[in-house]
Image (cartoon, helix red, strand yellow):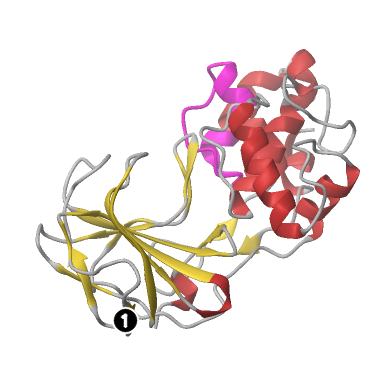
Amino acid sequence: MGRRLLHAAVPLMVVALGAAGVAQAMGSARVAALQVGLVKKGLYVGPVDGLDGPATQQGVAALQKGAGARAALGRWGKYELGVRTLRVGDSGWDVAELQFLLAWHGFPSALFTGVFESHVRAALVKYQRRMGGVADGIAGPQTIGSLQRTQLPSCPIGLAWPIRAEVTSPFGPRGFGFHSGIDLAAGRGAPVAAAASGRVVWAGVMAGGWGKLVIVSHRHGVRSMYAHLSRVDVQVGQDIRAGTLVGRVGSTGDATGPHLHFEVRVRGAAVDPLPALG
């Protein structure tokens, strides 16, 4: 496999980077699966980002020793995505590819492990429902083909910055997981504004690490989410305009310090907000 596999994977697609308005390339699902396999062998400690960087190449060199990298992973590397139908209980290279594609299509499933567990099935069902297919939680030829061919979702409306601040964590792979929004660095109590006009559909504490959260529903199936707030300044059912104060920056929920986690979803799929921010 070596260099040939690493560059023969799914074409890179521009979707998001860490600086405002700049895009980052979506990596290859096959390279991501390779990285997961290297992690399992103790040969890679970088992020599962699907990008063929020096650390990935070093891991491949250590693994191969004359054999193809996927073959060198043994039974775990036996199947590439699309060779078999995947369901709960399966594991391997192809499951890691599936997880990576689901995440970039807006449905992350915890850490990239290459194990088809219940959280992977839940993400797959959400994707199938969004695409209008049979939501059976089984990755057969139709679902896999859709993931490989369908353009990544994006935000169809323009957005204003909820707070002018540095992006400290962009949308995309982060460590062995996937960050479904962007983190904006700001001091505790800094005002957070609505990114577009719409109606407040959640205003309060939400379980799952969100802390104090505001969700605003916009046109075209778009929802914006403002998490870890120290204070909420709107109510459910309230119609607001872009720029309306929705809350204040905080560190509630799973947050190690004050910042705003800003997330955008389109018909349920998490999308990179940076290209839509004016």
Query: Relative to 167, is 250 on the left or the right?
Result: left
Residue 274 or residue 129, whichever sits in front: 129
Q: Residue at x 67, y 33 (%)?
A: 96
Q: At label 1, which amino acid type do we have?
A: Ile
Quadrant hosting residue 98: top right
The image quarter containing residue 232 is bottom left
> Above or below — where is 101 with respect to 34?
below
Q: Which residue sits furthest front?
A: 237
Which range is magenta?
36-56
- In what element is the residue under mark 1? strand
44, above or below 200, in the image: above
Coordinates of residue 167 in the picture (x, y in percent): 31, 62
Position of 129 with respect to 62 (left or right) is right
Residue in the picture at 77% in, 28% down: 87
Position of the C terminus, as image quadrant, is bottom left
Q: Is residue 199 above or below residue 67?
A: below
**Compared with residue 23, is residue 57 higher up or lower down, i.e. above or below?**
above
Q: For the N terminus, give its image quadrant.
A: top right
Q: Is residue 59 left or right of residue 217?
A: right
Expressed as whole percent of the image width and height from the top left, the position of residue 146 reads 81, 54
- Residue 243 lies, in percent from the top left, at 26, 82
Task: Say how many tags the image has.
Answer: 1
43 magenta-colored: yes
User: Which residue has dot 1 on it?
Assistant: 240
Identify the residue shown where x is 52% and y is 32%. 111
| Residue 278 part of the magenta-drawn span | no
Q: Give me the residue at 24% from left, 72% from top.
A: 163
Residue 67 in sight in this render:
no
**In the displayed structure, does residue 3 sit left or right of residue 100?**
right
Image coordinates of residue 8 in percent, x first then y, are 79, 48
- Give the prevailing secondary structure in the magenta stretch: loop
